[in-house]
Amino acid sequence: LQKLICLLNATDDPLIQEQALITLGNSAAFSVNQDIIRNLGGLSVIGGMLSDCVPKVKEKALNALNNLSMNIKNQEEIQVYITQVCGNVESAPLNSDLQLAGLRLLTNMSVTSDYHWKMTSSIPCLLRLLSEGTERTQIQVLKVLVNLSANPAVTGHLLRGQV
């Protein structure tokens, strides 16, 4: 895991970055690896890939962070990327794998109300995706909206959203 994180940090080759992110994401399916990746500084390295201009690299970074977000301590570090993830979801092509990867991460990050306030400005985008997206996109958006709707502090934002 340490070598993968170092490789990811050292290369600009999108194909190598994709493969390293896929491997880190798969490794994060095991809870012991989630802690190891965090302790090695991997969350910030993977989070840094969200700024990459190659959509496939962003998508794989989102998938890896999604698997890593199954851990409360990891969520505390991943939450700094929520605004950027919301931006990626909004700017990604409609129904794309990139958009779905961002929505999956937002779903995990919205399970508790700790970070809902970071997502409220994206409610109009989520409602638009619910209206315009395919069934896969709609299901993922609904998961985020259901999580947000469990928080009374978000009710006003949901009701004011233009559909």
Image (cartoon, helix red, strand yellow):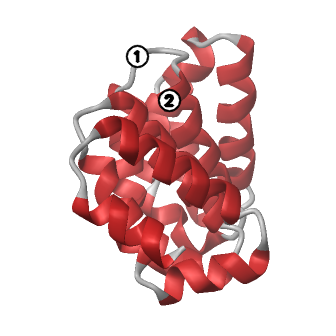
Question: Is residue 135 depicted above or below 110 in this figure?
Answer: above
Label 2 neighbour load within 10 Å: few <14, some 14-19, many 20+ = many
Q: Is residue 136 left or right of residue 7?
A: right
SS class, disc 2? helix
Residue 155 visible within the image: no
Residue in the image at 49% along x and 52% along y: 21
Q: Residue at x 68, y 77 (%)?
A: 33
Residue 91 seen anywhere in this rendered image of the structure: yes
Quarter of the rendering occupied by the N terminus:
bottom right
SS category of the residue bearing label 1: loop
Q: Find out whether the residues at labels 1 and 2 contact each other: C-beta distance under 8 Å.
A: yes
On the image, the x and y values in percent for residue 24 come to 57, 60
Residue 86 falls in image quadrant: top left
Q: Which quadrant of the figure has residue 83?
A: bottom left
Q: Position of residue 111 (x, y in %)?
A: 72, 63
Q: CA distance from mark 1 to mark 2?
A: 7 Å
Q: Earlier in the sequence, mark 1 or mark 2?
A: 1
Q: Which residue is mark 1?
A: 93
Q: Which numbered tag is attached to residue 99?
A: 2
Task: Please tell me whether residue 71 is drawn above or below residue 8 in the rendered image.
Answer: below
The residue type indicated by label 1 comes to: Pro
